[in-house]
Amino acid sequence: MQIRTVTEDYIKDLLDKGIREDGRELTSYRNISIRKGVIPSAEGSAEVMLGNTKVLAGVKLGIGEPMPDKPEEGNLMTNAELLPIASESYETGPPSPESIELARVVDRGIRAANVVDPKSLFIEKDKVWSLFVDVYILNYDGNLFDAGTLAAVSALATARMPKYENEAVIREGNLGKLRTENIVTSCTFAKIGKKLILDPDSNEEEFMNGRITIANDENSIRAMQKGLSGSFSPKELESLMDVTFDKSKELRRQIIQLGE
Amino acid sequence: MGGSNKPELIKDGKRLDGRSPDQLRPIKIEVGVIKNAVGSAYIEWGNNKIIAGVYGPKEALPKHIQDPEKAIIKCRYSMAPFSSLEEHGRTGPNRRSTEISKVTKEVFENVVQLEKFPGAEIDLYIEVLQGDGGTRAAGITAAAVALAASGIPMTDMPYSVSAGKVGDAVILDLNKIEDNFSDADMPVAISPRTGEMLLLQMDGNLTKQEINTAMQMILKSGAEISRIQKEALKSQYEKILEKYNK
């Protein structure tokens, strides 16, 4: 059990006045910085700081077999690790439902938005590229969904593409880039009392009763996930979609910038 | 999502199984199918066959998971290895079932009056015996009836159904073939008393307008699903009454 550093009343009183502990507006992000290529051994990598939340994503490519029902497509696998180093409350052991949910929501956005076209990972009959995206949570201060998606997509958007020649994988030397088709980002909202806030930090997540993540590209919604016991009205969802389309522009711009 | 050899899913406004875009598959619910469980329900939703069972409230174990202020819900959604037309599945939890168990648990944390049973656990089991698309929604719908039948106090009896898109058409309650070739899938659970969403997931490609259309279809179908849930509950007591009157 973590020591509650901020009381629920304190957070709620602030929200009633329309402000947050760190001075943000209800629908503002904390500072975001993305560093690409931090782990040169990986084909792609990116470290995202979202406030004090620190997430590292690594991309590796290897040779694999296609799934029997999709013989002409490569494999995409996304995993997330809530490392014990990242928080007092994380423990070692088998993956928790929380880490599985995080991985699957990040994965869903990437897949649904066709960030990497699985057909472009086909090599020859019974031989395809397997693309592994590992999302490593290094420091927890809330909103792992958006930080995780940002890190994963940034790593994909800046990854190099190994070559497969004479039955060997060439990972070094003169390599092209991994082909990406789209950019997806997500916006996560917490519900505390009746208030909806974007990008909750760990103090706010401690007291949220509902959470919604909306992943989108320029034109459409690509994935959504509601979490926790709280409920949302269809009307609230509508307004959160509007905020998402607005706020995602800046997130997308930061990812595009990495490639320039 | 997507895929080759895509069949024509909608022809002249009708779907492969003859339904209109906003039409539910036939739903049948039977209460009290597992004698050992405190509450149970069997649902046939199209070709889905699912059993939901409730045990508890009882002392939460191991002790360290107890919450001194309220009961906790343990939920297990699981698909039988023989439940699909495809190959034999693997027994035991996987990443998909772990996630579905988590979001299902969260649906019922909203409506079960947990504060009435501090330190207790309520076990909720959803066993998919045959799956044909929309198993999490059908499972939640059955679990709501099983919980109500168990007598555990609830503020509402949620229902769940999925909407999605094939081609340009938004459709309700996707079956397996539609789901395999759909452009989007959006399972939702609703608390009918408040009209609020207790479950919301989505993946694919939907505009805001399409999401609103899908949501309207889901909310409209709720009256029918809720009616079937309530009738199943009622018929259980009518049976007892009949026996008594004999």
Image (cartoon, coloured by chain):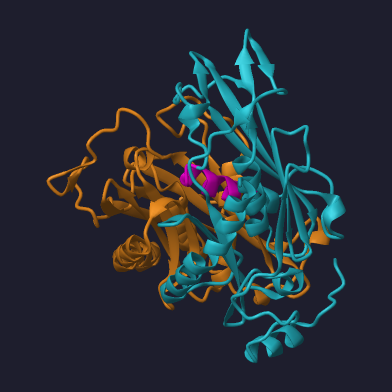
Q: Is residue A81 above or below residue A48?
A: above
- Name, please, the residue furthest toward the left: B12
Name the foreground residue: A16 vs A147. A147
Q: Specify start and end residues of the magenta stretch as a single range.
A: A103-114
- Name, please, the residue furthest toward the front: A260
Name the foreground residue: B216 vs A57. A57
Image coordinates for residue A102, horizontal then vertical, percent: 64, 52
**Toward which corner of the image does residue A233 lie, by quadrant?**
bottom left
Is residue A160 among what the camera can see?
yes
**Toward which corner of the image does residue A86 lie, by quadrant?**
bottom right
Q: Is residue B228 above or below residue B92?
A: below
Q: Is residue B207 above or below residue A116?
A: below
User: Quick one: which chain is cyan?
Assistant: A
Q: Main secondary structure of the magenta part?
A: helix
Image coordinates for residue B150, horizontal then vertical, percent: 53, 64
Image coordinates for residue B87, horizontal then vertical, percent: 47, 24
Determine the residue positioned at 74% across, 71% down.
A206
Q: Colour of chain B?
A: orange
- Name, please, the residue furthest toward the top: A166
